[in-house]
Amino acid sequence: MPTTTTTTTNTNTNTNTNTNTLTKSDPRPDSAHSEEPDAFVHYHDGGIPGKRRILTSAAAKQTFTELPRIDMRRMFSDSLEDRKELAKEVGAACRDVGFFYAVNHGVDEQVLDSTFEALEKFFKLPTQVKMETHNKKSAKFRGYEAFLEGKLDPRTRGDLKEGFLMGEDATDPEQNRPMTPSTSTPRNQWPTSPSAAFFRPAIYSYYNHMLAFSKRLLSIFALALKLPEDYFDAISTHPMTNVRAVHYPPQSVPSDVGIGAHTDFCWFTLVCQSHTREPALQVLNGNGHWVPVTPEPNTFVVNIADFLKLVTGGTWQSTVHRVRNIGLEHRYSMPFFFSPNEDAKVSVLDRFRKEGQVYDEFLVGDYFQTRLDIDRTTHLEPGDDDDDDEGKRTGAVY
């Protein structure tokens, strides 16, 4: 997953995963109950450690306690004014929260239902079938990732999930490229077992619908930033995209995490999650408290990622989030990650620049690969507890 990682100050490496011993807990970290002034939530943001002080009582500040819910039907309106009104709502959510629910988004509910059926069926296949496409065989880390192989939180035993990653690949005929460049090499890995034949078409149906939705959403983001609707089109002709199919089993160890706290290092992410009675996705608010993201049928969770925070000079929030599946149900999710073209250059937009400040320009592909290498090969320790910052950033100067 394109991700930028968290840890709380209290951890436990007990490896017992018997769901009968599961204990439900507050969605905030254990240390969130502490009244001590030095209680922090630790995470990784922009590839380096950060932390947020947990504020309680009189010290608490105004911040979000739930995600806004936005009706996306105006995205399809012929009226520019309708689309601009929608963009105002979206822009406010991106500035104040960094996350929102998107309803009436235009993606057929049957597509989503069929995709989740395929996910559940795939992850029930024998391990040897799934391991045929193990991501260690891919330079782009595409394919299958087994339980505990990911470790975004260095204080845990690993991420309690299994997943499958695919993305843009000019050699896959399903991507409808007019021609395959002669220099292209396959990026995706697909299982060849007849027992998994259903998986590729199901994932591609979802992928193509999400790509279309993402490009419409990109125009709304442009309007929200008071730019022409097509402002980002030139750098998104062949965007970097990924779909990650993920299975989170029930957690019986309170200190386990499905995926450690992090920010995403793409442009933005769209998440469709299966229904579970106990919310598993959690978003960190300004007071250092975890806000649960309750699954809603036929609804996407949209979150801003590092690149959109970068180009807005930090005005839009790339918000820290994690997954803790502390209920008794298996959870499945299908995040879709969208980034500009690999050869695109990005920097802080003019309207967000401060006089006298110097801003770097980034080649998207280089930055993306650097972040991917960090998150895949390096487990960074949390920042120094004397520092009260909410995280430091690499790259552009804000």
Image: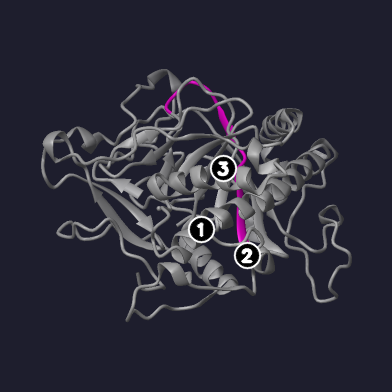
Quadrant assignment, res 169:
bottom right
Of the two numbered discs 3 and 1 on the same chain, state the one appearing first in sequence. 3
Q: Which residues are magenta?
A: 326-339
Query: Which numbered disc covers residue 231?
Result: 2
The picture places residue 17, in percent across and down from the top left corner, at: 43, 29
Q: Label 3 vs label 1: CA separation?
A: 12 Å
Quarter-wise, where is residue 29 in the image?
A: top left
Q: Position of residue 123 (x, y in %)?
A: 66, 35
Residue annotated with mark 1: 225
Please, what secondary structure does the residue beneath circle 2 have? loop
Identify the residue at horizontal 62%, vertical 64% (top origin): 231
Crowd rating for badge 1 (residues with CA inside 10 Å; few <14, some 14–19, many 20+): some
User: In the depicted view, which residue is nearer to us: 361 or 367?
Assistant: 361
Q: Is residue 235 part of the magenta span, yes or no? A: no
Q: Is residue 290 above or below residue 388?
A: above
Mark 2 neighbour class, 10 Å CA radius: few under 14, some 14 to 19, many 20 or more: some
Q: Amino acid at mark 2?
A: Tyr
- Who's the residue at 84% across and 52% down the image? 174
Label pair 3/1, CB-CB below 8 angstroms: no
Kind of residue indicated by mark 1 = Leu
